[in-house]
Amino acid sequence: MISRILFVCHGNICRSPMAEFILKELLRERGFESEFEVASAATSAEELGNGVYPPVRRLLEARGIDCSGKRARRLTPADYGRWDLFVGMDQANLRNMRRLFDGDPAGKVRLLHEFGGIPGEVEDPWYTGEFKRAEEEIRAGCSRLLDWLLDGRKNA
């Protein structure tokens, strides 16, 4: 049963922390907060120790979500044994994870949009400036991911 989810993006300051906090909010709203562990990490070392990027922080705060204690951290090979599911935002994230994990023998590495059958990737708003669009896509993806997780529990 999947209960530990790690969201992954390039720097861990925009997309993956947004997904982390949105999924935590959805879990809280549906009464499943205590049954899951959710976090996020980066595939690169560029932003290590930095907080959530200000436009993302403002979007989350507008929804009443406090992410002030979050600091970017880098994914490690040891994470593969600790987490049940790794959810990347784009194909580069998936490639970097598989390289770090020496493949994906247990099939734990997935793309967020896979859960809703949506083609494409969540583009990095750090480059595009489309923070609201990224938030909408991530919120929709996290909602579908949560449905998938809960369906898996029913069928287990």
Image (cartoon, rainbow, N blue to C red):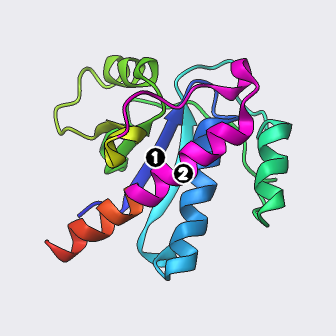
Q: Earlier in the sequence, mark 1 or mark 2?
A: 1
Mark 2: few/some/many CA within 10 Å (<14, 14-19, 20+): some
Q: Position of residue 96 (x, y in %)?
A: 41, 18
Q: Position of residue 54 (x, y in %)?
A: 85, 39
Q: Secondary structure at mark 1?
A: strand
* Position of 13 relative to 139 (above/below): above
Amino acid bearing label 2: Ala
Q: Secondary structure at mark 2?
A: strand
Amino acid bearing label 1: Leu
Could one spot residue 47 in this view of the protein?
Answer: no
Marking on residue 39 = 2
Locate the C terminus by quadrant: bottom left
The magenta-colored residue range is 118-144
Instruction: Name the quadrant containing residue 56.
Output: top right
Q: Position of residue 21 (x, y in %)?
A: 63, 56
Q: Nearer the viewer, residue 58 or 109?
A: 58
Picture residue at 31% right of the left edge, 22% below the top = 98
Q: Position of residue 117 (x, y in %)?
A: 31, 42
Picture residue at 78% right of the left edge, 33% below the top = 50
Picture residue at 35% right of the left edge, 65% below the top = 147
